[in-house]
Image: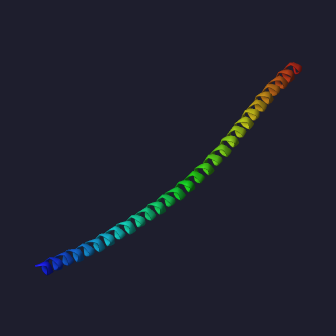
Amino acid sequence: MIEEWKNKVEEIENKLVDVKKTDKAIIAEINQNAQKEVFKAKQEANEQTKITMKALERLRQEESRSDKYRDEARSLKKKLQDSDMQIKMAKAQIQQLATFAGSRGR
């Protein structure tokens, strides 16, 4: 009877060792999968950061181009206003000359 109990205890201890081995294997697999997922998430985050940085750089370039075109438009508008003023002054001078020539011809 004692021998039977010893055999049962030994059998249960062997099963317990197997369960512990299985638990360790499962835990190791879970840890490995978790590490893979963390690594994958970090890679995706890094890729998103790179994409965001490129988009931000393009945005800065577009803003710079926009500022340049705005300055050019402002400059051209001033030149147009100056030309308009010169034309008005020339018309006024022509009218004065025409009036002066008309009064001299009489």
**Quadrant of the snapshot with the N terminus:** bottom left
Quarter of the figure with residue 84: top right
49 vs 65, left or right, is left
Figure colour scheme? rainbow
Question: Where residue 87 sits in the image (x, y, percent)?
Answer: 76, 32
Quarter of the figure with residue 102: top right
Q: How many marks?
A: 0
106 vs 49, left or right, is right
**Quadrant of the snapshot with the C terminus:** top right
Between 74 and 82, the one lying in front of the other is: 74
Q: Residue at x 81, y 28 (%)?
A: 94
Q: Residue at x 66, y 43 (%)?
A: 67
Between 104 and 8, the one lying in front of the other is: 8
Please, which residue is most extreme toward the right here?
A: 104
Q: Is the residue 90 above or below the residue 69 in the image?
A: above
Q: Residue at x 63, y 45 (%)?
A: 66
Question: Where residue 92 sits in the image (x, y, percent)?
Answer: 79, 25
Question: Where residue 23 sits in the image (x, y, percent)?
Answer: 29, 69
Quarter of the figure with residue 98: top right
Between 29 and 92, the one lying in front of the other is: 29
Please, which residue is most extreme toward the front here?
A: 2
Question: Where residue 63 sits in the image (x, y, percent)?
Answer: 62, 46
Q: Residue at x 64, y 48 (%)?
A: 65
32 vs 16, left or right, is right
Q: Is the residue 72 above or below the residue 1 in the image?
A: above
